[in-house]
Amino acid sequence: SYVLTQPPSVSVAPRQTARITCGGNNIGRKSVHWYQQKPGQAPVLVVSDDSDRPSGIPERFSGSNSGNTATLTISRVEAGDEADYYCQIWDSTSDHHYVFGTGTKVTVL
Amino acid sequence: QVQLQESGPGLVKPSETLSLTCTVSGDSISNYYWNWIRQPAGKGLEWIGRIYTSGSTNYNPSLKSRVTMSVDTSKNQFSLKLSSVTAADAAVYYCAREEFWTHYFDSWGQGTLVTVSS
């Protein structure tokens, strides 16, 4: 089964840049999607297909994907960005199913 | 704007079957995939499975033997049944929409907490 590995936590000062990685075997060949989840709330899609932003998501959120690592970048971090972030892919190699990353807690210092 | 709402018992006894329903409003249930995703307290997200409005399904291999999903287009609802539950199945259960062939979840329900206890 395909495994997506994220760092458990990332700390960043306000107005700085946060980078959250998502590691997987040849993940660059897959489309990666990212979700933000605040405490007590459902996840919200913030980046789809590696680097597309859904309507209403600030331009500060961007994504990239190459080789064995996908990255979600949050520029000019705000206090409201403090949340858990999950990457997600569609594993079509066998038993077609979805896989989520382990999740990263972003703390704004 | 589409809205999803999970409903069902918040308490299920061990070895029994968990049953949840997701009601979709603000849009037709047709021509989308409908997913169930769960999150144990303090842990990450786990995809359970999905159903298309034709009735076609895909399930998480780790849960496949215990999962059944169904859809009722006349009621704009879809459902999850998870059999032989244990404490490990206690979680917040979310329903989520997936536009055909996008492979991501663009709308989510608020989630419903299911506890497993006798």
Image (cartoon, coloured by chain):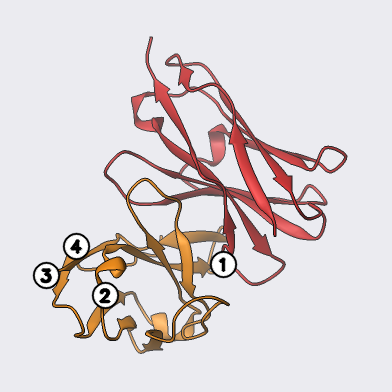
Chain colours: A orange, B red
Where's residue A74, x and y in %?
31, 81
Q: CA–CA distance between discs 1 and 3?
A: 31 Å
Residue position for label 1:
B104
Q: Earlier in the sequence, mark 4 or mark 2?
A: 4
Residue position for label 2:
A78
Write down the chain letter for disc 2: A
Where's residue A14, x and y in %?
18, 78
Question: Are both tags, 1 and 4, on one chain?
Answer: no
Question: Are both tags, 1 and 3, on one chain?
Answer: no
What's the amino acid at mark 3?
Leu
Residue position for label 4:
A8
Judge left or right: residue B88 versus residue A13.
Answer: right
What's the amino acid at mark 2?
Glu
Residue position for label 3:
A109
Residue at the outermost top position? B118
Label 4, residues with CA under 10 Å away: few <14, some 14-19, many ≥20: few
